[in-house]
Image (spheres, rainbow, N blue to C red):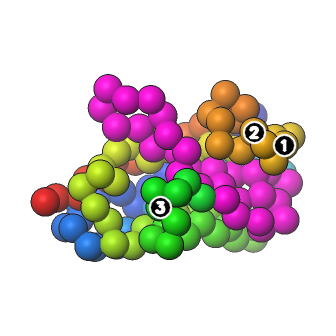
Amino acid sequence: QVQLVESGGGLVQIGGSLRLSCVASGGTFSRYTLAWFRQRPGQEREFVAAIRYSRTTHYANSVKGRFTISRDNAKNTVYLQMNSLQPDDTAVYLCAGDAGIILSSIPYQEHYDYWGQGTQVTVSS
């Protein structure tokens, strides 16, 4: 059973930066597609970014050019570097993973088998 644990969230001012981390255990990390989703209060979970085992990356249009996803297979960790943060980025950020996800399914939460508990990011205005 794969477990994912996020960290790195917090309170930041507009224009600031944060780096989120997600550590995985219990699976063959290097084979997984890892993704970040976010959820604002009362809203649907939203795709943010993903990185495949090949290190190919995918981003939501709303974060392109501001957020960068990366992975360190030696540390079983995926990162989300978030720059130029805005109040609209305030949300709980969740890490997700799956071994068999296909390219067209990457932005859709229902295709991920494993989830972390989330870490809160708050951007103050």
- In-image side of 10 versus 75 (left or right): left
Residue 85 placement (x, y as % from top left): 32, 66
Residue 33 placement (x, y as % from top left): 76, 51
The answer to whether marks 2 and 1 mark residues whose Cβ atoms lie closer than 8 Å is yes
* Labelled disc at residue 105: 2
Task: Choose the circle earlier in sequence order: 3 or 2.
Answer: 3
For the point 30% across and 32% down, the residue is 41
Among the 4 quarters of the image, the one containing residue 17: bottom left
SS of the residue under disc 3: loop
Task: Choose the circle earlier in sequence order: 1 or 3.
Answer: 3
Residue 86 placement (x, y as % from top left): 28, 61
Total numbered labels: 3
- Crowding at label 2, few (<14), some or many (≥20) Cα neighbours within 10 Å? few
The amino acid sitting under disc 3 is Val
Q: Quadrant of the N terminus?
A: top right
Measure how far apart labels 2 and 1 are at the Cα level. 5 Å
Residue 51 magenta-highlighted: yes
* Labelled disc at residue 63: 3
The amino acid sitting under disc 1 is Ile
* Frontmost residue, 61 versus 110: 61
* Labelled disc at residue 91: none
Range of residues picked out in magenta: 30-58
* Frontmost residue, 64 versus 123: 64
The amino acid sitting under disc 2 is Ser
As displayed, is residue 12 above or below residue 97?
Answer: below
- In-image side of 60 versus 26 (left or right): left
Q: Name the residue under label 1.
A: 102
Residue 83 placement (x, y as % from top left): 39, 73
